[in-house]
Image (spheres, rainbow, N blue to C red):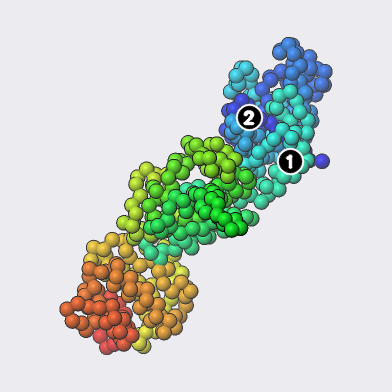
Amino acid sequence: MTNMWMVRAGPGAFLKEDFKKYNLVAIGWNLGDLTNKSFEEIRQLYYKKYKNYKSVKLVYKFVNDIKVGDYVITSLTWDNHSYLLGKITSDYYRSEKITKTDNNNDNYFDVRDVEWIDEIIKFDLKKSTRKHLGLVSTVYEINEDAKVDILKNVSKKPPIINFKRNIIYFGAPGTGKSYNLNQDKNILLENYEENYERITFHPDFSYANFVGTYKPVPIGDSITYKYVPGPFMRILKKAINNPSEPYLLIIEEINRANVAAVFGEVFQLLDRQDFESLYPIDATEDMKTYLNKSKIRIPQNMFIWATMNSADQGVFPMDTAFKRRWDFKYFSINNNDDLIRDTKVTLNNVEINWNDLRKAINDELLSYKINEDKLIGPFFAFNEYHNQEIPEDIFKDIFKNKIIMYLFEDAAKSKRNQLFSGVDKAKNITYFQVCDEFDKNGIEIFTDSIKENFITDDGE
């Protein structure tokens, strides 16, 4: 039968990097070479050095009871809640690979080779998981129920180490921010599809909406007040109660709310070290009741991902202190445009490549000194037509309602007459005029520098 053992990485897990580097576990009583030594011989060597028999059984277990093929876990943090899992690949032997000593000046020369399997397991290893308790807990066997539970969680655990905890996907409109976030979500939550919440910030979004507050709740014919947690607190509680599972909070349009007001004191928790909040905050009385904790930290298995249109940065600016607590992933204006490279439409008997038209419009906008974050991304429109022919009526409808509207009211608002110079117009051009002319003459509504990419002198 394959057993599982705990072998701690010294006081405060100070040998964890050595264990990982040299692919081994070790103990530090340093009684000399114990190969083929009986229990009584080890007992006498131990007494000779320490004048007691306190940990003789633990030394004997490490040397003789642990078998090749057994599982082993070792602590990675001082609080013994994070572990490295591996399999024993050698019998006991002496080695001087590790030259560090512990507080008792003992060298860790007694070793077993290990093949490490999993980087980090977030698991609350209670005393009840021990099959055989020694007087100290440097080496002990994990009971069968706990072993099964650990391996079950490990086998389901996605590669969460490779994902950022706080990240903002940002770029111009239509560059695929939400799409790519959703793809990453599917990988992160491969075996935990329900472990997320998605919210959208807006100018009236508040701390009460995000974290929680007391709200009136009807009970029969009367009204009482009850603490109602927001999405942040709901995800936080689930992550705390299920430390081996990843949990994700998705915030769409994060800069369309006043983030300083929405996050409040929770802002402090975004500073992380080893994936967890570096600085805890004191829980309010309602938080204490809800979480059953007096101090709050964001645990390593909780992720907060957000999207932000860089064109909307002026809605609610983010200060530097808030920004530095996030990683940012930028999506360029041509990100994944290969997916629309062959997306076409026949418009008024002229074949138009949508990606070429988009780029021509963007080039014109840049010539007006319009910021890059106002340009049109590949997925601003026509998302269902990747490298396909778009029906003319559908193209016209979407182009008027999305592209022309955006250009007219936002990106090229100060350059309307110049951009739409192909429209017969009075002094002030109107959106109605542009759309009406587009229905009649297609892209001839645009300035010559755009038209010349698609329409020749003979109209073909």
Q: Which residue is mark 2?
A: 9
- Position above or below: 90 against 199: above
Q: From the top left corner, tell me how far across and down residue 383 is, in percent.
A: 46, 72
Residue at image position (26%, 69%) is: 412
Return the mark for residue 146: 1
Closer to the eye: label 2 or 1: 1
In the rendered image, the quadrant that contains the C terminus is bottom left
Query: Residue 231 versus residue 222: which sits nearer the camera?
Result: 222
Q: Amino acid at mark 2?
A: Ala
Residue at image position (58%, 42%) is: 289
Q: Amino acid at mark 1?
A: Ala
The kind of secondary structure element at disc 2 is loop
Residue neighbourhood size for the residue with mark 2, other residues' Cα within 10 Å, grouped as few (<14), some (14–19), many (≥20)? many
Q: Residue furthest left?
A: 427
Query: Residue 296 versus residue 345: which sits nearer the camera?
Result: 296
Say if residue 85 shows up in the picture: yes
The quarter of the picture where residue 194 lies is bottom right
- Position above or below: 186 against 324: below
The quarter of the picture where residue 356 lies is bottom left
The answer to whether mark 2 and mark 1 are in CB contact below 8 A is: no
Distance Cα–Cα, label 2 vs label 1: 20 Å
Among the two numbered marks 2 and 1 on one chain, the one whose residue lies closer to the N terminus? 2
Residue at image position (79%, 17%) is: 43
Q: Is residue 121 left or right of residue 93?
A: left
In the rendered image, the quadrant that contains the N terminus is top right
